[in-house]
Image (tube, helix red, strand yellow):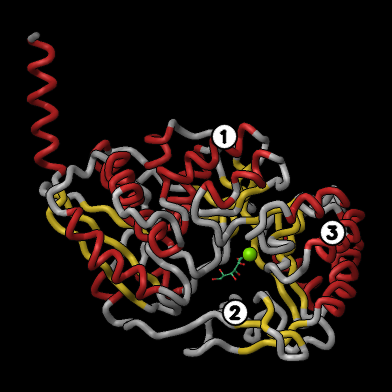
Amino acid sequence: MAIEDNSQVRTEGSVRDREIVAARVIVTCPGRNFVTLKIETRSGVYGLGDATLNGRELAVASYLQDHVIPNLIGRDAGRIEDTWQFFYRGAYWRRGPVTMTAIAAVDVALWDILSKIAGLPLYQMLGGRSRDGVLVYGHANGKDVEETVQEVGRYIEKGYKAVRAQSGVPGIKKAYGVSNLKNAYEPAESELPLETVWNTTKYLNTVPQLFEKLRATHGPDIELLHDGHHRMTPIEAARLARDLEPYRLFWLEDATPADNQQSFELIRRHSITPLAVGEVFNSIWDCKQLIEKQLIDYIRTTIVHAGGITHVRRLADFAALHQVRTGFHGATDLSPVCMGAALHFDTWVPNFGIQEYMQHCQETNDVFPHDYTFREGRLYCGQTPGHGVDIDEKLAAKYPYSPKQLPIARLEDGSMWDW
Ligand code: GCO
Ligand code: MG
């Protein structure tokens, strides 16, 4: 009886401290647009969650502002699972990128708060580290095969053990993944969507040449990846996957859209090139069949777009049963807050595969100070309690929202295609 009484007193004390007293949405554009949720407790501990949905940022900001925050005030920040269920089941309108990004922002902010209260880095809260560092892949691209091969070499020199290679394609003006400027590839560059023209035949003729040259130049050990960005039909994807087999890719990403998950059966039937998909998924239901039928090898769905740590943990555990490993999306349109949370998750998750790492620009890094570091092809999360990423709100306020949308693609005859 005495023991129960004591724990009662302890619990009630901390519940009062953990009460959510304020929550705010911060929209900022240090190089590109980011939406961040900041949740504050009575004791002054705060947590941050990324809520960025590239090209649809303000929809999530409004969802949080108008529909989520009024329900957060007064809740116990320690009830992470119940809060997740409240916003998922309680919304009635389930799933979808806007809802699941908003839920993710709340979830990550609450994990951040609870870890800070415990005085532990977030990965400890999940069960501790499974590895010391997180294998990452960088993005090499060039205007043609020659330039891309050289770019990959530069990544190898910087210590990368895995590199994604995207090359310009003769006859295609603006191929996906190829930067105009010499800095990082940023697709959302215009206020209204930029129109690009696509030709799959030209693409399919170029990519095998690229990987042949890459293996001949850089040898067998470097891990090579490629992103098809949903442009191919299943049978075209099967052809590319088969043509690339001699060059042993780490993965071929988004070979075909997975709206119909069964499409991947066709690719699998023809090729042993490992497949990755899922950066646009927002729940376990988008990949249930892909995983349980072992139609993919890596699941790309990341924390910010799929309901946060609470949901992605469930997804990763399900994937582990089928020997599917994680390979989280990590483009620069996911903020350092997402990257911090993802790295803690990657450090813990038993069925980790790889983490995408496109480096943020200096302005972004200044607005979001963080403690993760890159060393010899791996990222290491720090020991700061929480996910280790903060926001400089004064600096953030100097970069107002700047409307930008992702491009679209049309075939040469003008038909809409998948970008
Ligand atoms: C990737 C992605 C990005 C997306 C971008 C869209 O693999 O990193 O495909 O390049 O196009 O994140 O917002
Ligand atoms: Mg991709």
Q: Residue flagged by tag 3: what amino acid is it?
A: Ala
Q: Earlier in the sequence, mark 1 or mark 2?
A: 2
Is the Cβ of the residue at disc 1 closer than 8 Å to that at disc 2? no
Residue 417 percent across, percent down from the top left? 69, 79
Left or right of 245? Residue 59 is left
Whether residue 157 is visible: no
Q: Residues within 10 Å of mark 2 (few under 14, many from 20)?
A: few
Query: Is 229 located above or below residue 387 in the figure?
Result: below
Q: Please name which of the two marks, 3 or 1, marks the residue nearer to the observer.
A: 3
Query: Real-space Cα distance between discs 2 and 3?
Result: 32 Å
Task: Identify the residue shown where x is 42% and y is 72%.
Answer: 364
Which residue is under mark 2? 183
Determine whether, in the image, residue 92 is placed left or right of residue 238. Answer: left
Cβ of disc 3 within 8 Å of ligand 2? no
The answer to which image quadrant residue 19 occupies is: top left
Q: Which residue is mark 3?
A: 238
Could you tell me the amino acid type at mark 1? Answer: Pro
First-in-chain label (3 vs 1): 3
Q: Quadrant of ligand 1?
A: bottom right
> Which residue in the protein does label 1 denote?
350
Q: CA distance from mark 3 to mark 1?
A: 30 Å
Residue at position x 89%, y 54% in the image: 245
